[in-house]
Amino acid sequence: MSLRFVKMAFGATVLAFLGATASPCASSYIQSFERSANSVTLYSKSGALRIEVCSDRIIHVVASPTRKIPAAIVPAVIGQCNDSDFRVVSSESMVAIHTPALQVSVDRATGTLRFFS
């Protein structure tokens, strides 16, 4: 499988997933966030969004209309996201997660996620 195909498949999967689930944070601004060993959870008035770093190249996103993130059931994923090497950068306008292979940026005003390689 080529790297380009994997990137396109990953992007399509993320876009399909986010279209159905990322709306809770999109309707109001990001108020705060918490970092754990393998994730960053962002909170807004209308819900929460957790971005889990499973590896340098694998990101798992879960959203909820409440502040509590439900246990994700993903049949294609058989392992848990463990401690990963990533850093969090925060500014007035965004919160970003950097791994050695990619970056995930969340706009604080809109909740929009952007993925960069």
Image (spheres, rainbow, N blue to C red):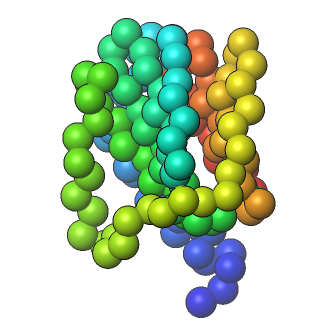
Tell me: residue 60, above or below residue 90: below
Q: Quadrant location of the C terminus?
A: bottom right
Question: Percent position (x, y) of residue 79?
Answer: 36, 72
Where residue 3 appears, as percent x and y from the top left, is 68, 79
**Residue drawn 51% across the image and 41% down it:** 36
Location of residue 55 by image quarter: bottom right
Tell me which corner region of the image, top left, top right, bottom left or bottom right, holds residue 6. bottom right
Q: Please indicate whether residue 117 sits to the left or right of residue 62 in the image.
A: right
Q: Quadrant of residue 102?
A: bottom right
Q: Is residue 28 above or below residue 95?
A: above
Residue 2 drawn above or below residue 112: below
Left or right of 22 on screen, residue 3: right
**Is there any visible trace of residue 112 in the rendered image?**
yes
Q: Measuring 70% from the left and 16% from the top, which residue is drawn there?
A: 93
Q: Give percent across and percent down for residue 53.
A: 54, 55
Write the residue at 66% across / 42% down: 97
Q: Residue at x 33, y 14 (%)?
A: 46
Q: Position of residue 20 (x, y in %)?
A: 32, 40
